[in-house]
Amino acid sequence: MHKISVALIAAIYSLFGGIAHAITIDSLDSSSTNAAPAGDVIISPLRWVETVSPGDRITRAFQIGNRTSNPMIFELSTEDMVGTRDLEDPVRFLGAQRAPTQTTARDWLIPEVREFRVDPGKRAVVSVVLQVPRDAKPGGHYAALFASGQAITDKGTGSISDPASGVDIRTRLGVLLLANVRASDNDTGFTDTIQPSGRIVSFSSSRRVYSDTTIPLSIVVENTGQTHLTANTTVTITNLSGKIVGRMQSSDWHVLPDSVREKRFTWSRSVLFGKYYAVAEVAFAGKIITASTTFWVIPMNIVVAVIIAIALFWFMWWLRQWRAKYPT
């Protein structure tokens, strides 16, 4: 039985005012700055952040571009995701498992097209619906929309569901959904946005004393609330006299409920010496939490120079004492 391509189906439906709006195929815009590369396939945007009310229905378009030399078949799927306390792997995707009712959102994401083909140098613009149930629990709900792609090689053609088709080059890209559901009152219709809360677990440098002028700093934030925390962080560094000698910033990094996440900074200057103070400010939802740390910088070239100077001074003193004791 011959398989009908998605493009042909869309064309047929378009004649009758069907679902042609659900996907469009056009040339890939290589200058796009919103798409993050993953191999030779791109997806944009990478995050979908919404504050919603029970019963809301929102549609958004996503772009999937093919920068390989082969046509590719993509299939869209959804998974729940949860935060973890593992700093190296702060988010876990649950696959076929479902998150608790309090945070699940995999069924809320409804792609209007599940499977489609994208030729080299082309992109698909796909509509995805976010349908929030009327009985959705207030607080954060999290899921991922995955685009699983396989390249069609000269071995044959086919779809993802047909492993005998000769499709053997695979890739998987994801878009993260972070939805904050407002609390609602069925009697009054009043809605209230759930506010995030969190704390700084630690803020430190890897050592107390450095011999070079590149200083790594790490801040770990814990989300203690019921919805995701979107943090903007500023690290300010001052010297012993209180003068600001460095400032670093990081914006829009997310920490999911009941999880911790680390943000790393690297501060470097050509010349550093002495004791320094670092203050981290984490701002979210109109709140600011702070932490501080200190470190010393004693460059090795200065240490060597001081040792040589002391050695020379000692040698000159010893030589003077020797000549005084044994005059010629």
Image (spheres, rainbow, N blue to C red):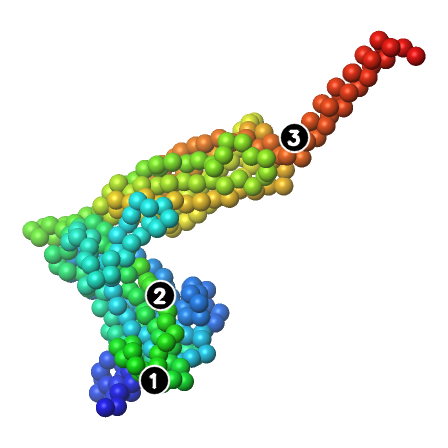
Q: Earlier in the sequence, mark 3 or mark 1?
A: 1
Screen quadrant of the N terminus: bottom left
Looking at the picture, how far across and down is residue 28, in whole percent?
A: 43, 75
- Whether residue 78 sits left or right of residue 304 in the image: it is left
Residue at image coords 31%, 41%:
222
Whether residue 196 can be seen here? no
Structural distance between the alpha carbons of marks 1 and 2:
22 Å
Q: Earlier in the sequence, mark 2 or mark 3?
A: 2
Screen quadrant of the C terminus: top right
Q: Label 2 is placed on what type of residue? A: Leu
Instruction: Please say if 95 is above or below 5.
Output: above
Circle number at residue 157 = 1
Q: Label 1 is placed on what type of residue? A: Thr
Looking at the picture, how far across and down is residue 4, in whole percent?
A: 26, 87
- Whether residue 126 sits left or right of residue 120 in the image: it is left
Circle number at residue 303 = 3
Q: Earlier in the sequence, mark 1 or mark 2?
A: 1
Looking at the picture, how far across and down is residue 251, in whole percent?
A: 41, 49
Seen from the viewer's position, the closer of residues 185 and 135 is 135
Badge nearest the viewer, 2 or 3: 3
Q: Label 3 is placed on what type of residue? A: Val
Instruction: Please say if 259 is above or below 33.
Output: above
Mark 3 is surrounded, within 10 Å at the Cα level, by few (under 14), some (14 to 19) or many (20 or more) other residues, namely few
Q: Secondary structure at mark 3?
A: helix
